[in-house]
Structures are given as structure tokens and as C-alpha cells.
Amino acid sequence: MDETGISTVPNTTPKVITPKVKKTVGKISSAERGQTVTPVCCMSATGVFVPPASILPRKRMNPLLYKDAPNGTLPLISDIGYMNSHLYIDWLKHFVKHAKLSTEDPVLLIADNHISCCSLPAVLLRESYNVSYSSNTAHVLQPLDKCFFVPLKALYSSEAEKWLVENPGKVIALYEIQGFFKKLIVPQPGFNSKKKFSELQVLSHTTLTL
């Protein structure tokens, strides 16, 4: 399991080709400051992806914000758009539903040591679901962090740039962001999850990483 922050205003923009004599290039940007959305993804070493969760910076849930979301997306909201201990419980139930684990077929969940994952209710819930938790693994045993989110953000920047060109005068808002995720939060061509787990010495077929 892993999560990342994506802004409605991309942090990087694609390269622009102009005549050699041109020193500056003007373009319309989405906004000076964007809003951060947190996609939460999970995959197994065999290439099975749990439907993502998407955390929006909202105080009230609005189903219209998720109308274009990837199939099975778990809609979540928080004041600043980040994971917290309450949302982690919701995600864990979502994970158990799709991982189809049992006493005979337990699961090792690899995640970082964020406080949201370490609350007492979260620990008790994992125990009740036979989920073993490997903490303190951030940036070491994270195929998603190392090999999935980097190309995801690059593709998002490219899609956002294209959207702005096709919709002059408009800005990317929270209503559009799920449509981007539906295109992008899928295994990209050439992505070999088994190879990525192997590189990190995590090969058990029961292992999933968030």
C-alpha cells in the first residue's frame, strides 16, 4: 500500500518546442495554487490491483466529484486531502473486501510507518482480519513509490497540459481530477509487478503493498 499527493496544478510541465529566436513562451496555467488530492493504491506481486481510494480536500462529501472515478474507487474526504487514522480504517475495510483474505490465506501488508496506520483501532482491526503489517518499510520495500507513482505523475502532467490546451480559459478543478485518474491509475504498459517485487526482495504471492 502506498499513497501520493497530486495537485490540480501539475508540479512539472512538458517541454515546449519553439523557434530558436523565441526566448519566452506564454501559456495559461490552471491556477497559481492547486488543491492536493491523495490517491491510495495497492497491488500484489502477481499484478493484482486493489481498486484505489481517492482522498479529496473537502469537509462534506459530494458524489458528483467522483462520477468519473476509476471503477471501484473508495471515495474519501479530509480537511486537507491527506490520509488520517479514521480514513485508514475505511481503507483497510476496503482492502479486506477486495483482497479476499482468510485464516488459511493471510496477507502481509507493506506500508510506511505513518501515524495514521498505527492507531490502536487499526492494529486491532488488522489482527481481526488476519492481516500482518510490516512497518518502517517506506522507500525500501515500496514498488509503488519507486516504480509506479513517478510515471503516474509524469503522465498526469502530460494529460493536464493537453486538457488545458483543449479547454482554453478553464482550470483543472476537483471535478476533473477523477477523470484523469481513471485513465492513469492502471498498470502502465511494460510495468512488471513481479519484477519490481523481486528487485526489492519481496516475492510472496500473498504480499500486497499499499
Image (tube, rainbow, N blue to C red):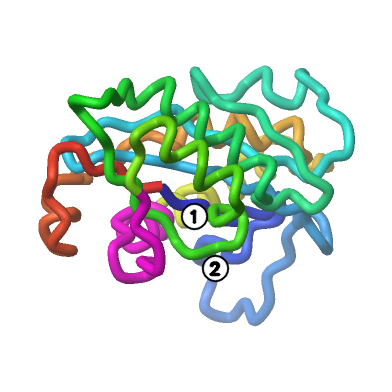
For the residue pair 209 and 156, the one nearer the viewer reads as: 209
Residue drawn at (54%, 68%), measured in percent from left and top? 18
Residue drawn at (61%, 37%), measured in percent from left and top? 54
Could you say which quadrant of the image residue 22 lies in? bottom right
Amino acid type for the residue under numbered disc 2: Thr
Estimate the x, y position of residue 58 in percent, counting from the top left: 84, 40
Residue 82 magenta-highlighted: no
Q: Is residue 192 visible?
A: no
Residue drawn at (50%, 47%), measured in percent from left and top? 123
- Badge 2 element: loop
Residue drawn at (40%, 62%), measured in percent from left and top? 135
Residue ID for mark 2: 18
In the image, the segment drawn in magenta is 133-151
For the residue pair 98 and 130, the one nearer the viewer reads as: 130
Estimate the x, y position of residue 137 in percent, counting from the top left: 35, 66
In the displayed structure, 198 sits above or below 183; it is below
Amino acid type for the residue under numbered disc 1: Lys
Estimate the x, y position of residue 185 in percent, counting from the top left: 44, 37
Estimate the x, y position of residue 5 in percent, counting from the top left: 60, 56
